[in-house]
Image: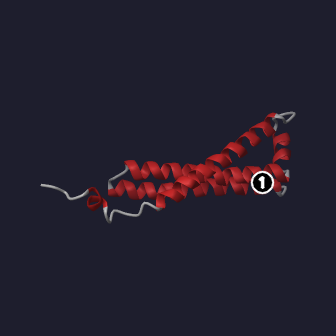
């Protein structure tokens, strides 16, 4: 009839220490976004024109290129953390969960890599 004590029902279900890292990483990447995204928006807003040559020249500058690369890394990692939480909470079927885990790990890395390579090409004088 009884299930034992409360601690007895949850004993062995996992450590409560691993969530702290995830929570802290989520908050730190959010703060990083609060710094980087407004910098990029304000920098772009202050450009004299928005044609290709002007934006290309702006992004070829070391500070702008560094900020953009950090934004790619920070934003996609932050998004991955958020999607991971939703995946853990709402996807329970085995086949869907496997596909979702592959996507949640592959898509942010691929998108960030594409953005970083694009910025590096611009910064080094490519098209």
Determine crowd level at label 1: few under 14, some 14-19, many 20+ residues with C-alpha closer than 10 A. Answer: some
Q: Judge from the rendering whether residue 4 lies leftward or rightward of residue 87; answer left or right.
A: left
Position of residue 27 measured from the top left corner of the image (x, y, whole percent): 59, 49
Q: Judge from the rendering whether residue 83 lies leftward or rightward of residue 39; answer left or right.
A: left
Residue located at (84% from left, 35% from top): 46
Residue located at (41% from left, 63% from top): 15
Kindly tell me whether residue 126 is visible in this rendering. Answer: no
How many numbered circles are shown?
Answer: 1
Kindly state the secondary structure of the residue where label 1 is placed: helix
Residue located at (49% from left, 55% from top): 103
Position of residue 35 measured from the top left corner of the image (x, y, whole percent): 71, 45
Kindly tell me whether residue 120 is visible in this rendering. Answer: yes
Q: Nearer the viewer, residue 23 or 59?
A: 23
Q: Judge from the rendering whether residue 120 lies leftward or rightward of residue 91; answer left or right.
A: right
In the rendered view, would you say 12 is above or below 109? Answer: below
Return the residue found at the far front: 5
Q: Nearer the viewer, residue 93 or 29?
A: 29
* Residue denoted by label 1: 66
Position of residue 34 measured from the top left corner of the image (x, y, whole percent): 68, 43
Residue located at (78% from left, 56% from top): 121
In the rendered view, would you say 50 is above or below 103? Answer: above
């Amino acid at each position: 009839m009884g299930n034992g004590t409360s601690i007895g029902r949850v004993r062995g279900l996992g450590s409560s220490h691993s969530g702290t890292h995830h929570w802290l990483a989520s908050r730190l990447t959010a703060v990083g976004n609060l710094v980087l995204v407004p910098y990029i928006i304000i920098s772009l807003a202050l450009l004299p024109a928005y044609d290709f040559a002007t934006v290309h020249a702006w992004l070829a500058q070391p500070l702008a290129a560094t900020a953009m690369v950090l934004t790619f890394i920070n934003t996609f990692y932050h998004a991955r953390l958020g999607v991971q939480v939703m995946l853990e909470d709402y996807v329970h079927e085995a086949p869907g969960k496997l596909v979702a885990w592959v996507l949640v790990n592959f898509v942010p890395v691929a998108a960030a890599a594409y953005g970083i390579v694009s910025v590096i090409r611009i910064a080094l004088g490519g098209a």
